[in-house]
Amino acid sequence: MAVKVTKPQVDLREEINQALTLSGLENQSIIVNGLESKGKVQIGRNPRGYTGGHLFVHNDAGLDSTTKAELSDNAVLLLQPHSSNSTHMAIGQVNGGNGMGIQVTNASRTANWDIALNPFGGAVGIGTDSPTSKLTVDSNISSSSTTVIDILQSTNGADKQVAGIGVLVDNGGESTNAGGMFFQTASGGALTERLRLTSSGSLELGYSGAARQQADSQALSIITPATGGGQGIALKRLDSNSDQQLGEITFSNNTQDGLGGMRMKTSGAVNTTQLNFDIASSGAILTPLKVESGPNTVVINGTTADTGTTGGSRGLSIATAGGTSCPIYFGSETNSAQKSMYMTGYWIYLRGHQNEGIRFVFSQGAGSAPRSDQYEFKYNSAYRPTGNTTWDGFSDGRAKENVQDMTGALDTISQLRPVVFDWTDDYADAMNMFEMDTTDEHSYNHISVKENGYDLTRKNGKIGFIAQEFETVFPKDITQLEVQLGDEKVEDFKTVNYDSLIPTLTKAIQEQQAQIQALQQRLDDLEG
């Protein structure tokens, strides 16, 4: 049958103080004003006088709900789609009247059933009436950042925020249509930003409000807090086999993959690793640097060094400029008395401790022990194997031609003026001729500085020649270099090479011996 209501309004509140039930209508219709005339149905009071909507439902009790059972009992509208099961949807007041709740559950109000929006197609919009995708969320912001999705968990009977997803508007706001996303997690009850995806495509981990000037220019930035930091990227392989690659970071462009990178692998044992740094050279992948355990802790693979006048061999470069380099340290001392090797002013310096010095040691043909022939340089002394203080020079006759006997050696030696002299303070300063402070019980803490005074055994009472005078006799044995003497830079400071002096002295002795023998012969003839 059909029940037809034709009056503009039917109000049964004063006539019937009980529920109005329409039954037996499973296959019938209820027609309200023929629907075509826009009739309206009101269930319950309308204390605020709302006039919109064709169906108005009011729960006069106004009870708030905090559980599924309460929402079903206090619902302003309860929908059950069919009678074959107890699934129903309850709509009612929640959050102290500040919100409406929709809950799908069963008759006992214990089950958590699903809600499907447009299950057979169509879009869903939140905050917008014009969704542009399956789900469109309008944050309704234009010049700031806000959390759009909150994720809660029940903690001590209350819902607490544990995570959040939000949007951020970059500088320019609406005029640039530039924005990004951020992801938050809870720490100590408050949401803190942990990941940010910017409008330029940069990914920032551990952001939490730090200054982003440098991070903005990077594709991936990991930002750690000032205290308790140190977070990074962890690559973990879920097995424990040896000689296997654990992970890698590679670099590519749009034409070729794997142009370089870093690889970590286990080396022989599961708890021993090897780190490889790869680069590409004309399409071939090379490993110029490898860090591993064992005797070859750091392995550098370059090209064979050039021994001639050509250059271009590729290896390890520690240059800071054309004629300078950073130091390679030996030991833990990195202060002004550093023990290191470096270049400055195109000079290569090898600095050892002033007490122990520097040794050049040669390995044996077999075995690991060094040979006994060590070349040793110490503070104010130099030694060669077996304790000799002189050095070998090339003198093989097969490498010489136009060989002639020397003449006039005695006259040459007679032109030299041996002198006794003291070094000037400026030169002594330049050569660090200072007393050694040996008061510390540890010799490696002994130090030679100007405040200790000059080492007079090195500075005064020296024997030698004046280079300018020596040059008039042996001009080829004089060289010039640049030396700083006090405030003056001497660019033609002269040095003496005594190599010519030894054979000249030898010849002079021979010539003098010949004269002595001739005089002795004359004396013998006179006495005979």
Image (cartoon, helix red, strand yellow):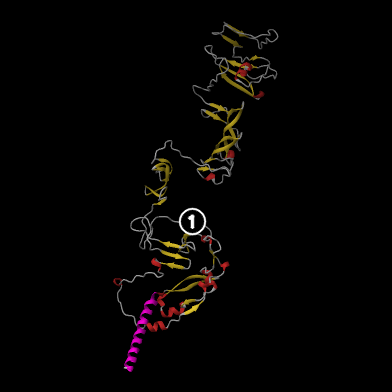
In the image, residue 458 sits, relative to residue 244, either above or below, namely below
Q: Quadrant of residue 306?
A: bottom left
In the image, residue 310 sits, relative to residue 485, either above or below, namely above
Residue sitting at x 48%, y 64%: 345
Q: Quadrant of residue 65?
A: top right
Quadrant of image for the N terminus = top right
Quadrant of image for the C terminus = bottom left
Q: Secondary structure at mark 1?
A: loop
Locate residue 339, reporting x and y percent.
Answer: 49, 59
Q: Amino acid at mark 1?
A: Gly
What segment is highlighted magenta in the picture? 499-527
Q: Quadrant of residue 223?
A: top right
Asked whether residue 252 is in view, the answer is no
**60 relative to 483 in the view: left or right:** right
Locate residue 236, reporting x and y percent.
Answer: 45, 38
Q: Which residue is mark 1?
A: 331
Locate residue 344, reporting x and y percent.
Answer: 48, 62
The number of callouts visible is 1
**179 relative to 401 in the view: left or right:** right
Locate residue 394, reporting x and y percent.
Answer: 34, 70
Asked whether residue 83 is in view, the answer is yes
**Residue 511 on the magenta span:** yes
**90 relative to 315 in the view: left or right:** right
Main SS of the magenta part reads helix
Q: Residues within 10 Å of mark 1 (few under 14, many from 20)?
A: few
